[in-house]
Structure formats: C-alpha cells, structure tokens
Image (cartoon, rainbow, N blue to C red):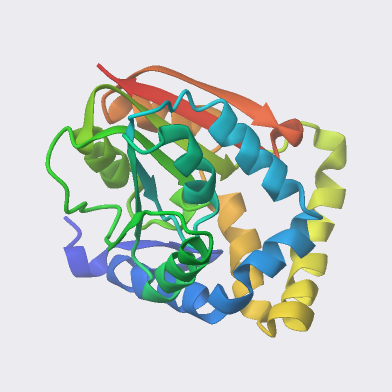
Amino acid sequence: MKRDSDKTTHFGYRDVPVEAKQELVGGVFTSVADRYDLMNDVMSLGIHRLWKRHFVATSRVRAGDRVLDLAGGTGDIAALLGPRVGARGSVTVADINPAMLSRGRDRLLDRGQACDFVQADAEALPFRNSSFDAITIAFGLRNLTDIPRALSDAHRVLAPGGRMLILEFSELRAAALRPVYDWYSFKVLPALGRLVARDEASYRYLAESIRRHPNQQELLELMRAAGFVDCGHRNLTGGVVAIHHGVKA
C-alpha cells in the first residue's frame, strides 16, 4: 500500500508529490495576480467575458440567494452575481491565494459592491453544512489537488435543492481543430505570458493543466459520485469550455 508521502498528482505534465501541488499552484497565481485579468483578455481575445456572463445568466441564481464563489480570484464572477442576488442575498468569494483575493477585494470595493472574502481551501471549506443556495467555480477546478474531495465538500455546504455550477476548460469536440488549438495553447500562450505577464512558465502550466483536467463525461461522473443529482453539461465554443451543473437532493 502506498504511503501518503509516496502519492503523486499532476502539476501540468509533471508528476509531483500530492502535498507539493497546492504550493506550486499558489506560486503560479501569486506570480500572475497583477496581470491576470489583462492576460485573460489577451489570450482569449475577450471571449472569457462572454463565457462568464453566459455562465451567470444561466445559473438560475436569484434575488435572496446565498452564493459561494470558489476560487473567486479577482472577482469576475462575484461582480456578475451581486446584482442577481440583490440586497437580500449574499456573495462570498473564497480563494486559497491571498494575492488573488486582495486583487478581487480591491476591484469590488472600487465598484462599491459588497462581498465577503474568505481565504479558504476548496477541499476543506470553513463553512457549516447547508450554508449556501448555489456554489460557482469558474476556471479554478482544474487547479485543485483533489477534485473529488472538493466536490464532496461543496455538496456538504450546499443547502438541499442548491446548485453546483462549474465553468471550466474542457475537451474540444472538433477533432480537425485540435492541431490548431494545441499550437495556440503550447506556442502562442506561453509567448503571450512572456511578453505580457513576464511569466512564460505559468502560462505553459495553465495550458498543460487543461489537458490533464477531466473531460465533459468524466467530470459528470465525478459530480455524481460526490452525491449530486440532475447533473448535466453544455459546451461553449465547441467544447473549449463547458458548463457543468448538479443539484443537492
């Protein structure tokens, strides 16, 4: 039997000790925090904003809901959720990385939007059972060390009938476009990272992490194993990204 100290996971295409991944991922996001929003615009040609708006617009989040935005980073999703929940609801942004949280807090304060910010590990959430009506996570799931554990803990803190909503890079459906997609991911993105964020390695990791992330069907199976029902997904931009959803019975 493998000892815990012998267990490995992936960090991009590298196999690393399980206990090392969180620190390595933390280093990536601390490095890119100041230019994270700019790089998202550059590398997606602004399309990430359309994905996020569609994600929130179809979330079924409504006035009065208590929403937890996991890996909330610089506050993109929280900014969109705030007007939907209104004064009677609440948005809590949780992220393990203090640099990203600080960026998001400053951004939303500048907009006059009230949110709670909590530094928290998505795999061990510091919230009571049934605390939220919805949980969102956008482009953060693939960076976690133990996705099944994170999904299980999200299920725990959701109230019965609450929805789990995931926006994440997934598997491109059009096989003919994969060579172009791979070229862009492994040649263009690292070069943009070097030029814009002065950090080629972090954006090479981000491209690799997409390839190691569970595809559409695999993520559905992980959600069901965590206890979610009525699970489904829909592809955006041909499967470049996908929205997954499930309900706590």
Is residue 170 something that shows in the picture?
Answer: no
Where 241 sits versus 61, above or below?
Answer: below
Where 133 sits versus 123, above or below?
Answer: above
Q: x and y percent of residue 26 in the render?
A: 42, 73
Q: x and y percent of residue 134 in the render?
A: 35, 32
Apparent side of residue 2 relative to residue 43 in the rendered image (left or right): left
**Residue at the location (54% across, 40% down)?**
167
Apparent side of residue 22 relative to residue 15 in the rendered image (left or right): left
Where 99 sits versus 101, above or below?
Answer: below
Is residue 21 something that shows in the picture?
Answer: yes
Q: x and y percent of residue 157 in the render?
A: 20, 38
Image quarter hosting the C terminus: top left
**Residue at the location (40% across, 28% down)?**
63
Depth order, front residue of 58/14 = 58
Q: x and y percent of residue 244 in the render?
A: 50, 30
Image quarter hosting the N terminus: bottom left
**Residue at the location (64% across, 33% down)?**
54
**Residue at the location (81% across, 44% down)?**
178
Q: Quadrant of residue 175?
A: top right
Where 116 sits versus 152, above or below?
Answer: below
Apparent side of residue 220 relative to residue 238 in the rendered image (left or right): left
Q: Quadrant of residue 98?
A: bottom left
All told, the count of numbered labels is 0
